[in-house]
Image: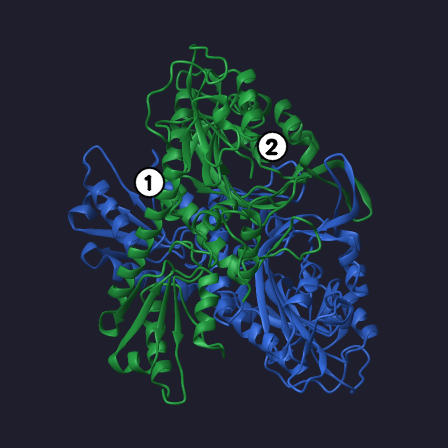
Chain colours: A blue, B green
Amino acid sequence: MATLPDKRTDFIEWYLAVVESAGLSDKRYPVKGMNVWTPYGFRARRNLDRILIREIEATGSEAVEFPALIPQTEFAKEKEHIKGFDAQVYWVTKGGSNDLDIPLVLRPTSETAMYPVFALWVRSHQDLPLNVYQIVNTFRYETKTTRPFIRVREIHFFEEHTCQVDQAAATARVRSNLAAFERMAAAFALPFVPVRRPEWDKFAGAFYSIALDIPIGEGRTLQIGSVHHYLENFSRPYGIQYEAADGSTKHVHQTTFGLSERLLGAVLSVHGDSKGAVFPREVAPYEVVVVPILSAASGDAPTRAANEIVARLTTAGLRVHLDTRDDRPGAKYYYWELRGAPLRLEVGAREAAARTASAVDRLGTRGLVALDTLEADVERALAAFDRALLEKARAEFAGAFALAGSVDDLRGSKQVRQLAWCGSEVCGHAIEQAIDGALLGTPEGAPPIAAPLPPGCLVCGSTDGVRWALAARPL
Amino acid sequence: MATLPDKRTDFIEWYLAVVESAGLSDKRYPVKGMNVWTPYGFRARRNLDRILIREIEATGSEAVEFPALIPQTEFAKEKEHIKGFDAQVYWVTKGGSNDLDIPLVLRPTSETAMYPVFALWVRSHQDLPLNVYQIVNTFRYETKTTRPFIRVREIHFFEEHTCQVDQAAATARVRSNLAAFERMAAAFALPFVPVRRPEWDKFAGAFYSIALDIPIGEGRTLQIGSVHHYLENFSRPYGIQYEAADGSTKHVHQTTFGLSERLLGAVLSVHGDSKGAVFPREVAPYEVVVVPILSAASGDAPTRAANEIVARLTTAGLRVHLDTRDDRPGAKYYYWELRGAPLRLEVGAREAAARTASAVDRLGTRGLVALDTLEADVERALAAFDRALLEKARAEFAGAFALAGSVDDLRGSKQVRQLAWCGSEVCGHAIEQAIDGALLGTPEGAPPIAAPLPPGCLVCGSTDGVRWALAARPL
């Protein structure tokens, strides 16, 4: 029972230790950065997917799946896009012992797989909007250090691609995606800030990119997704056109919305603590773990009570696990704390006799549930846990930002800095150099800290085009 | 509204026309044999997966996911296996502009991805059995003609891999898999026959292979899955060992169970008819389609009734679709017949006034449902449809086999032939030549036709080791 590294001082070591000791991912697969989804980790991933599917389908998007391999000829059609991805794609060059006539790219993202087919699907304004998404794995030949869930070479990926009649409709879809993400983030209990990336950091081929950033302590952030507006940047090279109501031919305006397994990395990073992982209810592999406490004197009453609890909660639709391993109760508590189970029910002889169970949630709150009112009591305990977790995350979110009034304020910062910026690339790079990290860009909507916008840019003092911006340290 | 080709005389043309006109798959993707899962096709696939997951998890198997890329060094460890797959794998040889030190295979199946890690997971007899499965896409550089769902280059694949303490336990797992497949096949209304493949046709590296074969008319069969017993054939090269209760070190015995999107191909092939696709309820993208019949005189009563029906059936957990397209009712009926919806509810002014709806199932059975008892009436209609579909499939299954008493009986056969075989490869090939197809192997358990086994081999007359065998024409 080794102690975990300190989350505050050794974040990465702490993170890696939690992923490994909670049994969420096995990185001993013989290709670097390609990890195995263990049974426990896969359960969390299934919940992640379920939340994304529920929220995106509520907006009328439909699931599809496009092939994983993209011909070089299609991949190369949009110039900025290929420039952005060329260095990090895997190439399939042989089938059996034959060299392929046209090499195939393992998708790093699916614009270039989907858009030649969109050109066939979209004919008339009646075919629009086309809102489809897929959940697939994507591949990037990552040269930076890999980390489970956060930076991997085979990425579990969610990508929505849409075609709209015009720019305004595409902008409305971007808004709809941001609203959908707010509902997803609520399920993960993850406060976030949508940030419009600077020009030099937008998605390859995009008109603009809004990233979804999450502070994870010590002035660092994690980008867990993004929404992009493409204008006609892809529809022109791929010929995605429609006949408008007035008989004219127009190119569609496109948007995309991307998320990934990094959301699990964010859940672990934000909620995890010195005891290990902490899962909000909807993501937890098991919402409730039941531990019978047996002794020579207890007989089988605790086992019978535990079985009843598991059967009833399963019937009620909960994900419940009965821990019948041959181990001490204390070791089991430690085990399930490490693995982040939201609620643990303990049943010994005394509880079984009284038709109760001790309930301990992952934040340490203790209570009692009565078997007579089991379902309602457990529901209440889980809801209280989720609320407490969200409150804790909100408090940490609020404390993660600080205003910077001068370039000097950026140096050695342990908070994400909110500052006034003129929008120029020169000043942007000066900010990045000072904070030794990234200018994340301009918050969409209200900035994290409600304050009057200073009159001039933090760097050059120019009063022209001044807006709020956020800057963070690298992960 | 073109007519479909004749299923009996032009099966493949009929099949391709159904897949395309029912909007289940788009094969215009610019890589041959890699098709697009359309929104409608993807809904069927999701149902397929749900059935497989439900039945395999009921046997205690847990979901995992292993990487798609396998290092050449791991891929080459089991000699028979690599011989079997070498000609049909895709090779990833470059990352960005770098040649990879070790080329990577895009998994054609996952033995060689999983087993190096199983060697780390399995330590003691307490870790056994290890029963895990994954649903992923696999890749085969297919040189034969490709067909949507039936023979493709990117395959939606289900694969269970297990480690057992010994041969008997592995044999028991094979039995458990066959029983699980029986429950799956019931959901697809697909009668099948498990057939032990001859030595020359077993899976590369297997001790034996039991294929799951489905007759699809005219003496042809479709193999929709298989269960393999590996003995220690893989555990030895991959070093998957455990400490037994007596302290000795042993290699595990392994099994696998594979299924694929071909199940959808089988559903279409077996149930489809001159009007198009026919989906059993559990697989159907929509179980119920509601068509309001509007006219100048009808007002909005049909629309209101249709909305009520959709809302109530959705609440009851059914997959329901409201067809509000601007088209004639007759065109909509044709459309949903083509697409195989099990039950269509039609609501005109008269039905709305009487608080009823006309119900027409995909086999043509007509009835009436009352809105007062809507959920129960629809449930009854769907159950009756599923029963009728299964009965029809069973009758066709029974008629698909015929006994062959001589080699001459095999020529030009329009039925799958059941015959006596001595088990020798020479006689096997003689049978294959005569039927111009494949000796499928020996049925596990009762053969399709209950008849006394002839005393001698159909070919050589030998009475040694005579058993039933099945022979079929190629697809």
Circle 2 is placed at which residue position?
A: B112
x, y percent for residue B80: 62, 23
Question: Residue at the spot x=40%, y=41% of the render?
Answer: B56
x, y percent for residue B8: 49, 47
Tell me the distance, in whole angstroms, between the alpha carbons under discs 2 and 1: 38 Å
Residue placed most toward the observer, A196 or B320: B320
Q: Residues within 10 Å of mark 2 (few under 14, many from 20)?
A: many
User: Going by the image, does A432 lie left or right of B356?
Assistant: right
Check disc 1 and give the amino acid type: Pro
Residue B190 visible (yes or no): yes
Q: Which mark is residue A329?
A: 1
Residue placed most toward the observer, A318 or A64: A64
Check disc 2 and give the amino acid type: Thr
* Image mark count: 2
Q: Residues within 10 Å of mark 1 (few under 14, many from 20)?
A: some
Q: Is residue A373 above or below residue B168?
A: below
Residue placed most toward the observer, A156 or B454: B454
Residue placed most toward the observer, B181 or A108: B181
Place residue B286 in its image quadrant. bottom left
User: Going by the image, does A19 lie left or right of A219?
Assistant: left
Mark 2: secondary structure: helix
